[in-house]
């Protein structure tokens, strides 16, 4: 943070200098496979250096593997996604991408290999087509439609008054929450990313929308490395591996079935799931928030 002060007509100017230079420079891997490894990582945010978020954290994710990370708020789940994109550097240890220290890689190139879907999708006033293709200016209409099909968005888009040219408002006004998320998924898939990062992508949705979006995410993750930060356990049961995180430390790891048999923290979360009745469907649903 740089500070400039003019003494007479007192003007204070603050310029925020990014911690990570994302303008380019560094290695670009010729055959990116999507392997991710945290090796003895300890991390605190610069604004709160005395509050550890991850403590001697170790995790290796194989290419094409789907790993879900669950745990209470503040356990460090979303921090993992931030570090994989190198929005911050670790205080200790290494984050390795295909066995290369992430600090040696071209940041811009690295982020272009990743698709990110967050809890609140960022949509702008413009056509549906523009919102999907905004990160890939050379994408054709066929490319956009193919991404939308994988995201389970093509059918609802085709049913809009002007199809892909239908205008949506700032923040996605005019379409539902589940539809907004599927547009965001299509955008993330348009660049054909090797790694897909899902940061509580369904936590703000109602049950019906969640089911539609989760089906899209399951399809989108095929053949990709997927790191899924989850707020609801209903979204993680099909993950190849589930990590239970608490205060920056992995407490349990395994499949959904493994962790139920273990009878530990995860099993307790499942046991405490809330059963509620969904009006107009004559169905009971299960959910958990933590």
Image (cartoon, rainbow, N blue to C red):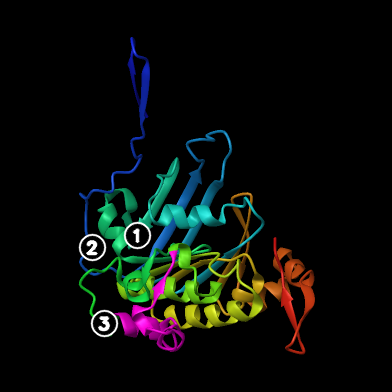
Which is in the foreground here, disc 1 or disc 3? 3
Residue nearest the viewer, comparing 90 with 190: 190
Q: Are marks 1 and 2 in contact (CB under 8 Å)?
A: yes
- How far apart, in angstroms, are the residues tagged by discs 1 and 3? 32 Å
Quadrant assignment for the C terminus: bottom right
Q: Which sits earlier in the primary sequence, circle 3 or circle 2?
A: 2
Q: Say which element carries label 1.
A: strand
Residue 47: x, y in percent?
50, 35
Stretch of the chain drawn in magenta: 144-169
Q: Say which element carries label 2.
A: loop
Q: Which mark is residue 97?
A: 1
Q: Which sits earlier in the primary sequence, circle 1 or circle 3?
A: 1
Which is in the foreground here, disc 3 or disc 2? 3
Q: Is residue 237 magenta?
A: no
Q: Is residue 154 magenta?
A: yes
Residue nearest the viewer, comparing 35 with 126: 126
Q: Are marks 3 and 2 in contact (CB under 8 Å)?
A: no
Q: Which mark is residue 141?
A: 3
Residue 235: x, y in percent?
60, 75
As drawn, the residue found furthest toward the top would be 8
Quadrant assignment for the N terminus: top left
Q: Which sits earlier in the primary sequence, circle 1 or circle 2?
A: 2
- Which image quarter: residue 284? bottom right
Image mark count: 3
Circle 2 residue: 29
């Amino acid at each position: 943070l740089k500070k400039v002060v003019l003494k007479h007509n007192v003007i204070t100017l603050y310029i925020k200098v990014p911690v990570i230079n994302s303008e380019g420079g560094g290695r670009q891997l010729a055959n990116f496979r999507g392997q991710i490894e945290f090796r003895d990582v300890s991390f605190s945010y610069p604004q709160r250096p005395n509050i550890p978020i991850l403590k001697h954290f170790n995790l290796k994710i194989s290419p094409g593997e789907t790993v879900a990370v669950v745990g209470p708020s503040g356990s460090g789940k979303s921090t993992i996604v931030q570090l994989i994109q190198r929005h911050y550097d670790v205080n200790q240890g290494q984050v390795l991408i295909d066995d290369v220290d992430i600090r040696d890689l071209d940041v811009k190139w690295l982020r272009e290999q990743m698709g990110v879907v967050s809890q609140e999708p960022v949509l702008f006033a413009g056509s549906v087509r523009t919102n999907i293709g905004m990160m890939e200016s050379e994408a054709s209409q066929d490319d956009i439609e193919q991404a939308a099909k994988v995201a389970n968005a093509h059918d609802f888009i085709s049913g809009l008054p002007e199809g892909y040219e239908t205008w949506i408002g700032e923040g996605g006004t005019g379409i539902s929450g589940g539809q907004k998320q599927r547009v965001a998924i299509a955008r993330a898939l348009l660049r054909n990313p090797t790694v897909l990062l899902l940061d509580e992508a369904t936590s703000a949705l109602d049950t019906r929308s969640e089911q539609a979006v989760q089906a899209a995410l399951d399809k989108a993750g095929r053949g990709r490395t997927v790191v899924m930060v989850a707020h609801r356990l209903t979204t993680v049961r099909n993950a190849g591996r589930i990590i239970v995180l608490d205060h920056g430390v992995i407490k349990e790891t395994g499949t959904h079935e493994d962790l139920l048999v273990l009878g530990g923290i995860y099993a307790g979360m499942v046991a405490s799931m809330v059963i509620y009745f969904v009006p107009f469907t004559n169905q009971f649903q299960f959910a958990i928030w933590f």
